[in-house]
Image: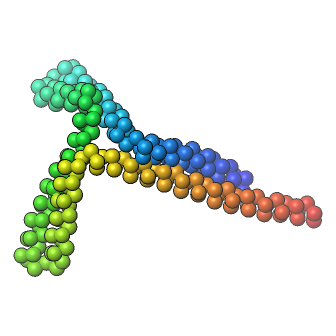
Amino acid sequence: MLDNLVEKLKSIRLHITATALACVILGFIFLIWPSQVTSLIAVAVGVLLIVIGAIYVISKLINQENKFSGMLVGFVVLILGVWILLNPSSAKSIIPIVIGVVLVASGVQELRLSFAAKHVDASKWGWMIAGSVITIVFGIICIFAAFEILNLAMRLLGLFLIYDGVSSMVMVRHVNVAERVVDSVVTKEEDVDDFI
């Protein structure tokens, strides 16, 4: 039973260590080269959209149902994929802008809801208004500082990956120490049994 547990721990430890090393390496790559990472992601998304668009167009050519609208959607996805593939730096800068627009729209809706809450004498409506304004400000920052936001996000992801890798390695270290303690106790018990 104990040998089975030790083998299981070794297997888990190996997987966690490999994953931890990969996280640390990826984290440093994200931290050092955030712009290149986002360009690579944009290219991958472009290729994926080209494949999806092509599959959609081909399937609509074969299948006669909803042929026009389906082919139109397929061509739009295909063209978007080609555009992203040819202009990855332009495509990647759109992501924070889209997020910014969503945040501004959400903040405006929250602001309207906050004023409605004020009119019905809801408690803490002032906090609701403040939260709405903060959401709008974050959205505006995303829109006007898209490139900086994207690089910051990649760097934060890099830091998160490094933290995950290092914390996993620390956990593996603690398991190693615990395993050695268990091994020494088992060895001492076996020595006592042999002595008796």
Which x, y percent locates residue 92?
27, 39
Judge whether residue 9 can be spotted in this image: yes
Instruction: Name the residue furthest top.
Output: 62
- Determine which quarter of the picture holds residue 134: bottom left
Which x, y percent locates residue 113?
11, 67
From what the image shows, is residue 89 above or below residue 168? Answer: above
Instruction: Name the residue furthest left.
Output: 119
- Towards the viewer: 67 or 116: 116
From what the image shows, is residue 175 above or below residue 154? Answer: below
- Determine which quarter of the picture holds residue 2: bottom right
Residue at 58% across, 53% down: 169
**Residue 13 in the figure: left or right of residue 120:** right
Residue at 69% across, 59% down: 177
Q: How many marks?
A: 0
Judge whether residue 74 can be spotted in this image: no
**Residue 132 in the figure: left or right of residue 171:** left
- Towards the viewer: 195 or 28: 28
Which x, y percent locates residue 156?
38, 52
Which x, y percent locates residue 196?
93, 65
From what the image shows, is residue 1 above or below residue 116? Answer: above
- Determine which quarter of the picture holds residue 75: top left
